[in-house]
Image: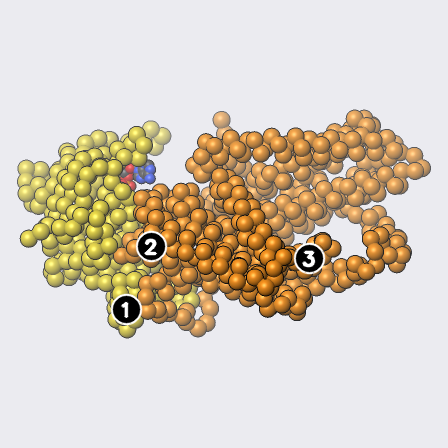
Chain colours: A yellow, B orange
Amino acid sequence: MTPALELDALTKRFGEKVAVDRLDLTVEQGAFLGLLGRNGAGKSTTLKMVTGLLRPTSGRIQVLGMDLGTDALAIKRQIGAMPEDMALLDMLTGPQYLRFVGRMYGLEDAIIDRRAAELFEKLDLEPGPKTAIADYSFGMKKKVAFCAALLHAPRILFLDEPFEGIDAVTNRTIKDILLGLQARGVTLVLTSHILEVVEKLCPQIAILDEGRLKGAGRLEELRQGAESLERLFVDLVGGAQTGELSWL
Amino acid sequence: MAVGPVRALLAAHVQGSLRRSTREFTKQGVWALVLIGVVLATFVAVPAGFGLFMAGYTLAPRLAGPNAEAPILVLGALLAGLVGPGALLGALLGGSKKLSWEQYRAFPLGRLRLLLAELIAGLGDLLTGCLALGLLVFCLGLALGRPALLPLLPLLFLEHLGLLMVLQLLLGSLALRVAKRLKLAVGILLGLTWLASMLLSMQEPGHGRGLPPAWGALLQAAASHLLPFLRALPTTLAVRGLDATPSGHWGTALLLQLPLLALTVLLAAGTLRLLEREQEALAPVERGGKAKLWSFRTPLGGLARLQFRTLLSSHHGKFGFLMPLLTVVLLKGPMARAQGQALWALPGAFAYLALFGNQFQYNQFGLDGHGVKGLFLLPLDTRQILAGKLRGYALYQGLQAVLLIAMLVPLFHPSLVALAASLALAICFFLVQSALGSFTSGWMPRRIDRSTLRNNQMPLPLVLLGVLVSLASTVLFGGTYALLAWLAPAFLLPGMVAWAALCYGVHRKLMPQAATYLDGRREAIVEAMG
Ligand SMILES: Nc1ncnc2c1ncn2[C@@H]1O[C@H](COP(=O)(O)OP(=O)(O)O)[C@@H](O)[C@H]1O
Ligand SMILES: [Mg+2]
């Protein structure tokens, strides 16, 4: 079976700064990968390249066997993405936005509305009928972005920090939805800087630091030897400081 | 070293602005800006400053003595003119809130501190800064002209500066509120138009060049009515107080400053209220009814609709609908006496309308802001995106053209042929800009804030390019129009339609290239939109 995602020496430079450094990574179809790393490790940059928002400095990205450089449109029809800063067309209301997005994937109005209603109910999203997304709270925006990523039933889902700024109840719901998706064979890639999230949710993990891949594989295999994921993470990434402040 | 909160706020503001402008301007941009600054300084600021200095210097000695009344009134009027209209202009050029009050809310900061920092930040505006300098120079002139005035001059300077800052912030905030309400703005403009046309119709061309006799009398009457008003101006009173210091009447001198100070405090209080109310208004407003959901057959339709909606949801875009009105006002007012108006008024009006769109055409993703990422995530061809934007924008400008026609027809009674030919001319302008803009949108993308009217969004090279292209198009298309209308009116319409068709053909030919170019620039666009 062709892998869902294949990164080949993927590199991204911003001027002098190397944000992603010769990253090789393969994600099989149906996998649930957690991309772990500290702030600034290059997680978002990687996802932005994979979803076509940033152009790699060098290297190759293949999604479902198609090359992102040549088959971008075909790939985009198969994937759903939630960027870190959500990037919504915020002059629209939530339902209007979903209509727009759904239509762009060629869905019928009735189908869009049904799915949107279901998602809104599950996620407990009840915006004012005329409130533009710009006036939504952070968590509400996040939910809308999540809905938009799921609306067209993508085969691969890329989520950048999906649990940031989300309340505990919705957190639970989103996790349930994701696990349901996985059971139905959807490939999932999410990034997080929070170990617990990834530890509880993702059977596979990849650890990124300063743009480099520090380790990848099944969680339990990686954890062998180290007593916990946190231990492993700190060992791989290094640089843990003592928690004392000079003035406190 | 402890830093006062106001200074900390200002430092953060200055650093933020500097970083933003260095990111936005390229190196050439900075140099061009410096050049423009130098030119403006030598030809405008320095002469104006010198004039103000001399005014102060020569008027100061005349303040004393029995004939002091006229100089006092002149000085008062001058100060009022510097502060009032100056603040208004500054406000209209973007003098609303600079600091993000929302962000500072969390800090333990008093409202007055915030207001003070806000007022000082307002001095960073080019115009306001210049006015403040002008005021300073003027006071220096006064001081040198009559050193005896010196003790009270710092107060005079500060209180006028304060009034200037408060007034500009207040007017800027009010202007923003008005701009937020399109209907109100149109109403106000309609009122002004009506007033202007009433005034202007009094001096119909038939009466000859000079003022009609009735006007002289009118002016005199106005002046006699104006005098008491001038006498009562707080600025005049302040100047009168200034005059009381050399004779040692300190009590009177200070008492006479009070009206100005009171006015400033009053206005400051009003401004504070306004800004705080603005804060509360930021909370989402629930209105009745349901927002209409869109339905469209092709992605193109959706994109067009999105573009149209985006334009309408922005202050800049709303402002566009005032352009037809302004055009008509210009034609009826200042330009009513120009030669051969019948020949150029119509094409001129349409060309003017088309040219206003520069900033959207040359920066087609600017209004999308960070939503552009959402757009680029969708399975959309760049060509589709461009075509959708073109349609939405054509609808937007088309509506404006309809508005313009609706106002031109009753005022100028144009012939159908001239109307149609002018429309074709406008289409030529539109297509040329759109074709060029499809490239520049990727070349120098920049975010346009949807919720302000500040006009600092076009990078300088684009402004220059815009001027150049507008000139060239005017010569080419406008020249054709004029020649045909003059020499061969029968060919006017076919000629202009042929031009429009040609432009359309070229536009179509260029779109694939533009799309390819934009494909390579997607990243730059995403970066620029933040
Ligand atoms: N547009 C940019 N320009 C310059 N540097 C960038 C840009 N985007 C990201 N970086 C840098 O690249 C590194 C990786 O960033 P990012 O991928 O956002 O990290 P994270 O893993 O926290 O998501 C950071 O050091 C960041 O400063
Ligand atoms: Mg990130």
Q: In front: mark 3 or mark 2?
A: 3
| Residue at left offset 28%, top offset 68% | A112
Q: In terms of sequence position, does the residue under pointer 3 or pointer 2 come before the other?
A: 3
Ligand 2 within 8 Å, label 1 CB: no
Residue B469's mark?
none
Chain that bears disc 3:
B
Give the structural element (helix, strand or loop) at label 2: helix
Ligand 1 within 8 Å, label 3 CB: no
The Cα–Cα distance between marks 3 and 2, rounded to whole angstroms, is 41 Å
Amino acid tagged 2: Arg
Q: In which quarter of the image is ligand 1?
A: top left
Circle 3 sits on which residue?
Answer: B341
Within-10-Å neighbours for mark 1: few <14, some 14–19, many 20+: many
Q: How many marks?
A: 3
Amino acid tagged 1: Ile
Please say if the residues under marks 1 and 3 sit with CB atoms less than 8 Å apart.
Answer: no
| Residue at left offset 62%, top offset 37% | B129
The Cα–Cα distance between marks 1 and 3, rounded to whole angstroms, is 55 Å
Residue B383's mark?
2
Near-viewer residue (B127 or B153): B127
Q: Position of residue A23 (x, y in %)?
A: 17, 38
Residue A112's mark?
1
Amino acid tagged 3: Gln
